[in-house]
Amino acid sequence: MALAVDWELRLQLEGTSHDPMYRRVAQAIAVDIRCGRLPAGTVLPGTRRLAQTLGIHRNTALAAYRELAGEGFIDTRPGLGTFVVERQGTDEPTPLTAARHRVPRTAPYRLRTPSGALIRRRPHPPGTLVLSHLPAPSEVPGVALARAYRGALRRRADDVLDYAQRYDSGAPFGHPRLRRALAQMLARTRGLMATAEDVLVTTGSQMALYLVALALVEPGDVIAVEGLGYRPVWEAFRFAGAVVVPVGVDREGLCVEELRALTERTAVRAVYVTPHHQHPTGVTLTPPRRRALLELATAHDMAVIEDDYDCQFEYGGRTIRPLASIDPQGRVIYVGSLSKVLAPGLRIGYAVAPNSVLELMAERRCFIDRQGDHALACAVAEMIENGELRRHIGRLHATYRSRRDALAEALQSRLGGAIDFDVPEGGTAVWARVDTGIDVDRWHARAIEHGVVFEPGSSFSLSPGASAHARFGFAGLSVPQLQEAVRRLALALASAEG
């Protein structure tokens, strides 16, 4: 595919004034080709445009292109243009390329030791079915979002496109319109008696959780986490200086008595929980344990970090309010996200906490992100205000319920002898117990070969080792795709056991 040079071609002309100008131009272009600045397929500017840009005679530009063509760097096609060609063979310098300027892969100075937390995943081949709990981008209400975005730019362009500190000293807390809309939404849907001043908007809930850790943690402080959970959050806590200690999870959620035993051995600065739908098991923290957790937090001066990441999806008609709604002291720092109901790439997260906590979070946020995307914030605020987000969630609720039922039926039909699970009453994934005779990680590897991806239980464990569990998400695939994915899972399992 041809890559046009839309910008003016700026060249670093080497050599001395005694060297012919055409030679200096050819050498500069050749060096840029060899170092990758001008990759194969790039359409170079015509000789008239090149001459005008460099302030040289057109004949000089013509001579430079002839020199480059003679050494195999470019090819001129009449009526089409001049193209950088793919070079074969060794990477030895030619008479035109005495130097390379590619950025080195390794820095020559001392760096911190890598943590190994950066996860680099290869893209899955086309046609791979991913059983993910994340929504497909195709589900986003694109027309409504575009309309709201255009409205934000049309009515308040100066406000949302400038550095917000010029107009609002509270800019690091997020745009006031979205803070107000979120507070009203949370009051109606989650029972949080919050105002706009109690809300801080972030670029996704991951940022919110990292900022919470920066606000709370001194190096070496302990944060207790659920023993099965979300690795990027654990790493965010570690980067903030925390020591992360796992606490068990069972069918009633976090094992509070195990946390109590931990507090008797060491000081615990905070505990991180996902009480609504425990990530990844989907269990709900029971009312007695909720009360016991808050009492324990009070007795040992702990903060409770509540991640209410997918509270919008309940299929049994029940209402389960968050810990923050029954916390009179302000010990709970409540974190949520709109990315699960809009699209993963639309990074809207938020935190609700006492103002002293939000002040520290906003202070640290200034040096990471300054203010976030205020244009997007106003667009999302409009979708909340005009009811579009509520209607979209209602549509997703019906869609996800049908997908949950289809996945559960397919898993029971094709894999009932290998796995056991409870049909989830909420959330967007099925957590399954796998027969102990099955190597789940081997099954996972074979599944990828068969064009389907699920999450093995070991990927959610803070402790290394195999796990006899697996998670199958249903948010991102249609019913026919889910049925096909389970068919492939069955084939992969047979292959893994063979």
Image (cartoon, rainbow, N blue to C red):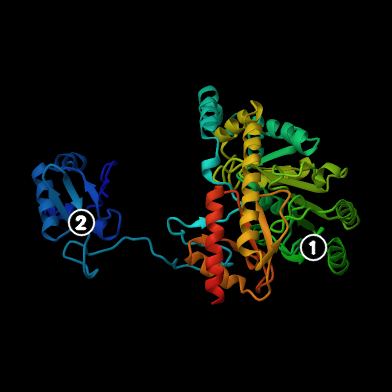
Q: Position of residue 496 (x, y in %)?
A: 55, 73
Looking at the picture, does residue 73 appear above or below residue 355?
Answer: below
Q: Amino acid at mark 2?
A: Val
Residue under the point 53% across and 68% down: 492
Q: Nearer the viewer, residue 268 or 413?
A: 413
Looking at the picture, does residue 458 appear above or below residue 68?
Answer: below
Looking at the picture, does residue 273 appear above or below residue 187?
Answer: below
Q: Nearer the viewer, residue 213 or 413?
A: 413
Please identify, in this view, whether the residue under mark 2 or under mark 1 is nearer the observer.
1
Residue under the point 79% across and 45% down: 322
Residue 416 appears in which quarter of the rendering? Answer: bottom right
Q: Outermost residue, top direction? A: 155
Label 1 residue SS: strand
According to the picture, the residue beneath numbered tag 1 turns out to be 250
Q: Position of residue 55 (x, y in %)?
A: 18, 41
Mark 2 residue crowding within 10 angstroms, few (<14) / some (14–19) / many (20+): some
Task: State how far apart marks 2 and 1 are (Cα).
Answer: 61 Å
Indicate the quadrant containing the C terminus: top left, top right, bottom left or bottom right: bottom right
Q: Position of residue 400 (x, y in %)?
A: 63, 45
Q: Give the number of marks.
A: 2
According to the picture, the residue beneath numbered tag 2 turns out to be 85
Q: Outermost residue, front direction? A: 413
Whether residue 303 is visible? yes
Residue under the point 65% across and 37% down: 393
Q: Nearer the viewer, residue 162 or 300?
A: 300
Horizontal relation, residue 132 to residue 185: left or right:
left
Q: Amino acid at mark 1?
A: Asp
Mark 1 residue crowding within 10 angstroms, few (<14) / some (14–19) / many (20+): few
Whether residue 19 is visible? no
Horizontal relation, residue 124 to residue 281: left or right:
left
